[in-house]
Image: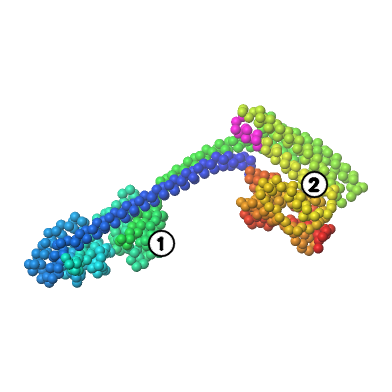
Amino acid sequence: MSIRSKLTIMFLAIGLIPLLLVSTITFTNYKNSLETSRLSQLRDLVTFKTEGVEAYFAGLKADVEIVQNSYLVKKNLPVLTRLANNPVDPEFLTAKKMLDEVLRKTPPVLGLSDIMLVNPEGKVVYSSNPEHYLKDFLNMLPDSQQKAFEEGKNKIYFSDVFFNKAEGDKSGLLITAPAFDFNSIFIGVIALEVDMVPLYTLIQDVTGLGETGETLVGKKIGNQVVYLNPLKHDPGATLKKRINIGETLGGPMQEAVQGREGVGQLVDYRGKKVIAAWRYIPSLDWGIVAKIDTQEAFADVVNLRNLVIIILVIISVLAGILAFSIAQSISDPIKKLSKGAEIIGSGNLDYKIGTNLKDEIGQLSRSFAKMTQDLKQTTASRDELNKEITERRKVEDELKRSNDNLEQFAYVASHDLQEPLRMMASYSELLERRYNDKLDTDANEFIGYIVDGAKRMQRLINDLLAYSRVGRTDMPIAEIDCNSLLERVINSMMPAIEESKARITHDELPTLVGSDSNFIQLFQNFIGNAIKFHGPELPRVHVSTVKEGNEWIFSVRDNGIGIEPQYTDRIFLLFQRLHGRGQYPGTGIGLSICKKIVETQGGRIWVESEYGKGATFYFTIPAKGGLNNE
């Protein structure tokens, strides 16, 4: 990917990521707020409806209690019962007339269809509704399950909703209660027939719930939910619409009739996803639900989402054009530098790479030109050195001394490379101090990049020098007590260990023959990495060894962040990093040094890790030549 493309993507990311984040947070907060508001509205509505239904039936209960204590009922119901087989008897007619004068006026006022009196055998002997009287006289009460009379003999009883055949299958229910004479002797049952229309009007008022809003009541009968009122999307559903408990459909009502109260998003009796509130009415053994289709409830959220998408698209296009323009103005000079570096890299050290630009890139190009001249001089010195090596090979040895000279050359070359880098860093810092208040934010930022780059290159060169020294033949060889050497390493790293509250432990370690500086580097790198890449827990490092065949296997186990499996080989390569510089410092050369040290000793190095659960580094040292190997 070209620099221009990378810069374009970077500028787009800088511009769009905060916008996306803010848009997402705003959208999510609005959605959650709207959902909370809708659910609260439904909860309040279902509470209001519940209180209205309970108040309605509490009023009917009070009405039936009034009829229970009525003087006319106590006096005349026994007469009607005694003369039921002779309704033309003057005494029967007189008793009926006395009741008619009061009870015929009551049903319209109370929203009832009829007030009936039932004799102790369960037969209707009085009806306040003249039309009913002709059909119901000496018949049983019209409830479908014929429970109203039996239950009403002992208490005030609310029957299930039923279709009244006498009213043309009009839905209603009965409220029954025992009647007693002046001596508290049971004389029959009082039955109030409730017209469900006023109650349905109360229940089905959905003011403020939009087009799909609906409130409904139901009852659990056996293992089914039975809907007790006409449904908005199914007007003929009363006592006919049934759903098995446990089905996907009718979720809110299933919750309500099973005695639960709550709010949430479920599927209604049509299979539509709705937000709903539900509640159980214990006095009636009913469930009540208020609901609205999710699509309508969250229509504002969808509109907001579409608007946000349109705005993001427009901003993305504008930001892309601007980012491309800025990136091109930066990338073109860098391309020229890259082309010059390629020419110089091919061996043409006479190529002039400097430019007349007055900005940071121009200064960088001139510093690069100076570095090229220094490299040219260094190359000449290298040629001289190669010539000397060739001559020495005629009279001296193992490729061994040649390696020593090449290592010395790497040191000299690295030393020479640092001079132009120091110049770049110094001039950049000088430019920053002198012109900080005269340059714009971008210019100051670019200067910071140059200073940071120069310093990082200096660290890389120093690490390269450390890498090149591994395996030098002039390093002193002696007995190494790994136990005492590890304690020296721990003491030298004590500030970092104490700051991180790390704990370093080890088993009994062997005594070997080798260079103590190499082993110090090994342990320092492993322990340092364990402290640097520690997880949420305090750093813990344990060093142990085991002898297998002709080699010692060392293991350094930590409880850090671990390494993903696909990177376990890559981490030992030169300058390979798994994290950005802003997360963890370093140049990515430490494990490369460890690998070179171990392989110089004739051993192997590898890592085993589970990401997020620490890592264990292993390396082997041949036992041949070591001490105390038994």
Left or right, 33 with respect to 282, comes to right
Q: Quadrant of residue 405?
A: top right
Residue where numbered disc 1 is placed: 248
Say whether residue 237 is visible. no
Residue drawn at (64%, 47%), measured in percent from left and top? 579
Q: Of circles 1 and 2, which is in front?
A: 2
Most foreground residue, 345 or 594: 594
The label number, if any, that marks residue 447 in the structure image: none
- Residue pushed farthest right? 395
Image-based side of 599 in relation to 216, left or right: right
- The relative height of residue 350 versus residue 232 in the rendered view (above or below) is above
Expressed as whole percent of the image width and height from the top left, the position of residue 489 reads 75, 50
**Residue 445 falls within the magenta-colored stretch:** yes
Rendered image: mark on residue 469? 2
Query: Secondary structure beneath disc 2?
Result: helix
Magenta-colored stretch includes residue 201: no
Q: Quadrant of the N terminus?
A: top right
The mark nearer the N terminus, 1 or 2, is 1
CA–CA distance in space, label 1 to label 2: 73 Å
- Please tell me whether the stretch drawn in magenta is mainly helix, strand or loop: helix
Direction from residue 152 to residue 406 in the image, left or right: right
Please say if 175 is above or below 206: below
User: Which portion, as a residue range, is magenta?
Assistant: 439-449
Residue 333 in the image: above or below residue 296: above
Residue at image location 14% in from the left, 62% down from the top = 72
Dividing the image into 4 quarters, which one contains the C terminus?
bottom right
